[in-house]
Image (tube, rainbow, N blue to C red):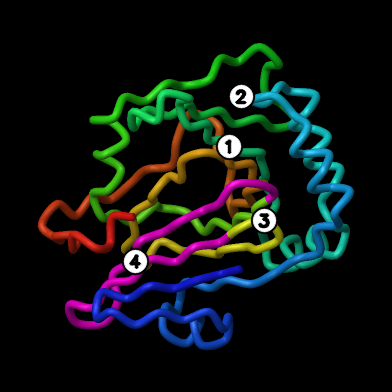
Amino acid sequence: MALLRLSNGRVYININEINDIVAPLKIGTFNLPESARTTVASFSHPLSKPDAMTVLKLLDPKVVDMVTKEGFSHRRVGNVVPSPKQDGSFAFVTRDENSSGDTPPIARSPKEVADYLIPHHVQVNDWHFVYSGGIIKGVQLKGDLQGVVYCGAGEWIRLNPTILNWPIFPYGQATVAVSYFDRPFAGGPFKMDLHQEVQVKPGMTY
């Protein structure tokens, strides 16, 4: 169930209301059958290349049509794996049709993960479809209002370069998502425009 927490203490669960508040960030739902959820839940983590390609095959054709019409033609499978120690470290891996099957995951220490909390703009339009785990985004809203948006399996979140945001990574379960972009991602991560002058409120970091 999608959820929005605001720094003023309010909580919203209706997707339409959430979208009105956090625009231009947008969330929604997509068809994710129970059989697909079960298949993804059976995978080991970090995801292998074959398992990641299976995730792509499970994507609803209506989703593919929708994102293609919107100009999103580059996609990959993202996998964020929390350490079993629950010490704040995570492993990150991305797989796409052209990636090497033996590409190792990228390990991030608790300090490196905490650095992701610096508010930033990512210089790309991106659209993420969650299969397991969750995508959690903090977002700067009007004035000094901030919010945290939670999207789980069967939900999507769409962002653009004007949205000042910060990711929060969930513990316990690995996150698997199909991410679409409006331009190629070869050559490493997309450029981030960091805004260290923007202070994230304490309640907006989880």
Q: Which residues are magenta?
A: 131-151
Mark 1 vs mark 2, CA separation in Å: 8 Å
Q: Front-most of 192 and 108?
A: 108
> Residue at the top extreme?
102
Residue at 26% in and 82% down: 142
Residue at 23% in and 30% down: 111
Indicate the amino acid at tag 2.
Pro
Residue 175 position within the rendered picture, expressed as x and y whole percent measured from the top left = 58, 42
- Residue occupied by mark 3: 153
- Residue occupied by mark 4: 139
Nearer the camera: disc 1 or disc 4: 1
Determine whether label 1 and label 2 are within 8 Å by CB: yes
Judge the density around disc 1: few (<14), some (14-19), many (≥20) Cα neighbours within 10 Å. many
Mark 1 or 2, nearer chain start: 2
Mark 4 or 3, nearer chain start: 4
Left or right: 178, with 26 as reference point: right
Q: Relative to 44, is 21 above or below? A: below
Determine whether label 2 and label 4 are within 8 Å by CB: no
- Residue occupied by mark 1: 174
Indicate the amino acid at tag 1.
Ala
Mark 4 vs mark 3, CA separation in Å: 20 Å
SS assignment at label 3: loop
Residue at 56% in and 83% down: 14
SS assignment at label 1: loop
SS assignment at label 4: strand
Mark 3 or 2, nearer chain start: 2
Mark 2 vs mark 4, CA separation in Å: 28 Å
SS assignment at label 2: loop
